[in-house]
Amino acid sequence: MSLLAIERLGVSIGTTVVLHEVSLRLEAGEILGLVGESGSGKSMTALAVMGLLPEGTQATGSVRLAGREITTLAERELCRLRGAGVGMIFQEPMTALNPLMTIGDQVAETLIVHRGLARSEARRIARDRLDRVGLPAPRFPLTLFPHELSGGQRQRVAIALAIALRPQLLIADEPTTALDVTTQAEVLDLLRELAHEEGMALLLITHDLAVTAQMAARVAVMQDGRIVEEGPTEALFRAPARPYTRALLAAARLAPLSDEYLDQGKATGAFSCQEDPKPDAGALLRVEDARRSYRLPRPALFAPAPARHAVDGVSFALHPGESLGLVGESGCGKSTLTRAILGLDPLSGGRITLAGAPVSPRMPPAQRAAVQVVFQDPYGSFDPRQTVARLIAEPFHLTGRPPDAEARIDAALSDVGLSPADRDRYIHEFSGGQRQRLAIARALIIRPRLIVLDEAVSALDVRVRAQVLALLARLQAAHGLSYLFISHDLSVVRAVTTRCLVMQAGKIVEEGPTADLFTAPRHPYTRRLLAATPRLPETWSTLDPPPASGA
Amino acid sequence: MRPALLIGAGLSGLAVAAAALSLVWTPWDPAAMAIGARLQPPSATHWMGTDHFGRDILSMLMAGARTSLAVALAAVAIGAGIGTPLGLAAAASRGSLLDATLARLNDLIFAFPALVTAILITATLGPSALNATLAIGLFNIPVFARTARGAALSLWTLDYIRAARVAGKGRARISAEHVLPNIASLLIVQATIQASLGILAEAGLSYVGLGAQPPTASWGRMLAEAQTMVALAPHVALFPGLAIVLTVLGLNLLGDGLRDALDPRLRGRLT
């Protein structure tokens, strides 16, 4: 008998069918990967197993946990089941914990509620569970509050919470998506270990096929509320039967820059740095010994306030037509550096020049017009109350509205693969990928020389991400743009940049051609980053070449 | 459809309609005295009866609605007109001296009991509807400043504001073009609530004789004059009391209803 048996589970909200005859089985101690793009129904499946479907949904079919039907259970029994039978870990470690409770109390609370344990006994077990997830007693006392922990440590607390009652099934919904690669590797290791050692079944929900390949013995692929394919991970990834799975795999396997693209770039005069190794000859963007420090609170009255050096003596140059990558984990100072390059925040030392003129928050509009930006969050990047035409015309503020502004707006929309008819629509009518295209159109409209891509594709699904990256490559060739590509995702940086910087603790620790950096990293930090990045095993390549994903 | 919004709009609309109608027509002259016909109970000739001077209560209520609404709305306009730009400026320059100064000024005004200070102001400047408006308006300024600042602060962290800064727009322009339209619904709701509080405050000031002066009709003064005769002619106090309660209730319901209706997260369920 399977530990978890989902049979012909259907869920609908009103007349919209969200899940369609989903059937899944999970044995004790097994890790099942559930992959798919956003909106495919992965999380809804998990919520159905937890009995946490939102109000107003109708469910059909059956979900059995250890032989017990749970779709018909009353709320009171479901409460007992959650935590004791099924534990769940969510994506966002920042919001999954109560900020006003100590970590010890949060873990102990579960034990007190479910087992009716005495407080001292509950705290003893909580201590044991926190030790188990790698938060040992001397460094992590029970009295810590969530804000005193890093994102990875908080996710460990969330895991300790989920396994406090030793449930038979653990559901992890994108448990590492919000974490840095090295932290992600640690958390994934922990989850794998827990499944093996405690005999827990793990349902791992993720959009990341590489993570699935590393973790799961079996994988189920979801699309539009259906399971389209299911099987042992390696066999399925080697020979996917469905075109959808093939497209996902192709998109996940972002190939390094193709020769064709490089040739095209050279023909248009891009990548000049490769032919011209003199580092500072005609650089478009030059950062010299940039420093930015923040004053920290004084440790004691009258003690000197310590400073945190967010950016600590960074120097590099970006050449016209080049794609430069800047890689680093959260907190390494790349956002601070980005804001300084965009002229939003001042530096406390050193200088930045763009096309020969200094960059500062007070630079004149004409100077500012040389650089534009695409941000990470496709949902926060646009004013919800303005039409598309007005939104993407915003940078005209820098150059003065040209007489052919309307035609330029239409051209920018067509350039990024949208229709000029979209100009009068509002931003909520567009999907995440379309919004990122609009953000690119907005950056392009005044023909800047440099576009800063600040995690521009990190929030997108793999297939959409591949399309947007292809679009960026095409636009670069067509308009002779330079990109500064800032990301924590090494596979993306590898796919689109020719040269790459690695940043750690405010300093550039390694710099070099992307291909060299990825095949022969010199700095230990770069090596650690590369080792931690989940990758689809090279040997798993599908026999037939994957069909090109449609634009 | 939301019942709260409907009832609120209905009651507030009734008060506005009565005030508007009183500009051109009232059943009787609200200031005309008829000592012979004083303290009459409601009848066909005087629908709500007459007061101790024989004035028609319905006519006085209609004219009083004009005073109450004018004072309350003008006070809201003062508060929103001065407080909102201050709040936007404070949010746009977060952490600066301006922000800190405004915050302390806000605290200062909040620290005084509003009605006592209003009494002080009207007592110093002389009792009149205009001075009552100024006094109430002064206390609306920090309310709008805080509401605007709080809402604007959360917007200033969003990427579209950063995108506007990359597009070279100044803080004032971003506040006007991107921030204000996105917090407008919140301010409208706040304005409705403040209007209802303004009506209460005006009635309070008139009650102690520091609001609109005779012969201008006022709900608060009607109540004050009627209170000695409550046992003798309860209707004289009842009707202005009801008018205040229903108008304040209506404006509050309207504010709550608008908050739900203007919230984009809930808007989908409305249609």
Image (cartoon, helix red, strand yellow):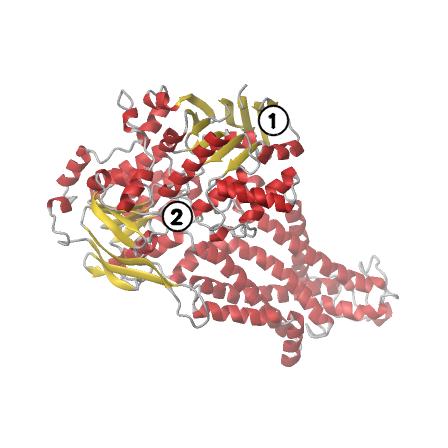
Label 2 close to label 1 by CB (< 8 Å) = no
Q: Quadrant of the N terminus of chain A?
A: top right
Residue that badge 1 annotates: A71
* Residue placed most toward the observer, B54 or A494: A494
Q: Where residue A252 appears, x then y in whole percent? A: 33, 32
How packed mark 1 is, by other alpha carbons closer than 10 Å (few <14, some 14-19, many 20 or more), is some
Quadrant of residue B121 within the rendered picture: bottom right
Q: Is residue A42 left or right of residue B122?
A: left
Q: Residue at x 65, y 56 (%)?
A: B251
Helix, strand or loop status at disc 2:
loop
Closer-to-camera residue (A429/B62): A429
Is residue A15 visible in the rendered structure shown here? no
> Residue at image x 14%, y 54%?
A282
Ranked by sequence position, the earlier of labels 2 and 1 is: 1
Q: Which mark is residue A399?
A: none
Q: Chain of mark 2?
A: A
What amino acid is found at the position of numbered circle 2 in the picture? Ser
How many badges with numbers are in the image? Answer: 2
**Residue A10 placed where, x, y %?**
54, 24
Same chain, labels 2 and 1: yes
Left or right: B226 in relation to A97: right
Residue nearer the viewer, A451 or A146: A146
Label 1: which secondary element: loop
Residue closest to the eye, B172 or A24: A24
What residue would you read off at disc 2? A381
Density class for disc 2 (Cα within 10 Å; few <14, some 14-19, many ≥20) is: many
State left or right for residue A437 relative to residue B177: left
The amino acid pointed to by label 1 is Thr
Furthest-right residue in this view: B232
